[in-house]
Each structure stands twice: as C-alpha cells, then as structure tokens.
Image: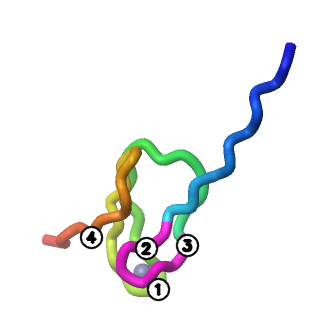
C-alpha cells in the first residue's frame, strides 16, 4: 500500500512581528506570541490576523 507523500508543514507566524509560532495544519486556533504578546487568530486557509483583546 503506497504511503501518501507527506505534505510540508505550514509555518504559522505572528501577524505582528513575524515570529514563528506553530508548524503544521491549523483548523481554528488562537495563539499568543511570546515576543510581542499579540494574539493571532488562525483559521484554515487564512493568514494570521490580530485579535482585539477585550
Ligand atoms: Zn509577535
């Protein structure tokens, strides 16, 4: 049984400072950048966007 080729992992970077935050497939996640404290909301197929903190 042929093994499917592994897809290269996507790099998820901070929308504010460009720091690498995550690698791999993301469906829907919010991650806080340890460098600039920006909360990046990432959903599948979208670029990181800043999320306004309440
Ligand atoms: Zn950042």
Disc 4 from disc 2: Cα separation? 9 Å
Quarter placement of the N terminus: top right
Badge 1 vs badge 2, beta-carbon distance below 8 Å: yes
Badge 2 vs badge 3, beta-carbon distance below 8 Å: yes
- Residue at 37% of width from left, 73% of height from top? 15
Q: From this view, report whether residue 43 is shown above or below residue 41.
A: above
Q: Is the residue marked 2 within 8 Å of ligand 1, measured from its CB?
A: yes
**Sooner in the amino-acid sequence: mark 1 or mark 3:** 3
Badge 4 vs badge 1, beta-carbon distance below 8 Å: no
- Residue at 40% of width from left, 45% of height from top? 44
Of residues 51 and 3, the one drawn nearer to the viewer in this rendering: 3
Q: What residue does disc 2 label?
A: 14
Q: What residue does disc 1 label?
A: 35
SS for tag 2? loop
Tell me if residue 27 is in the magenta stretch: no
> Dot 4 surroundings within 10 Å: few (below 14), some, or many (20 or more)?
some
Tell which residue pokes out farthest to the left in this image. Answer: 54
Disc 3 from disc 4: Cα separation? 15 Å
Q: In this rendering, which labeled residue sits more in front, label 4 or label 1?
A: 4
Say whether residue 3 is left or right of residue 16.
right
Picture quadrant where residue 30 is located: bottom left
> Dot 3 surroundings within 10 Å: few (below 14), some, or many (20 or more)?
few
SS for tag 3? strand
The image's mark for residue 53 is none
Residues drawn in magenta? 13-20
SS for tag 1? loop
Disc 1 from disc 3: Cα separation? 10 Å
> Dot 2 surroundings within 10 Å: few (below 14), some, or many (20 or more)?
many
**Image spot of residue 8 (x, y percent):** 68, 49
Q: What residue does disc 3 label?
A: 20
> Dot 1 surroundings within 10 Å: few (below 14), some, or many (20 or more)?
few
Disc 4 from disc 1: Cα separation? 14 Å
């Amino acid at each position: 049984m042929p093994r499917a080729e592994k897809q290269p992992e996507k790099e998820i970077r901070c929308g504010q400072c460009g720091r690498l935050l995550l690698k791999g497939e993301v469906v829907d996640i919010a991650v806080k950048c340890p460098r600039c404290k920006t909360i990046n909301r990432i959903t599948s197929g979208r670029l990181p966007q800043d999320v306004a903190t309440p």
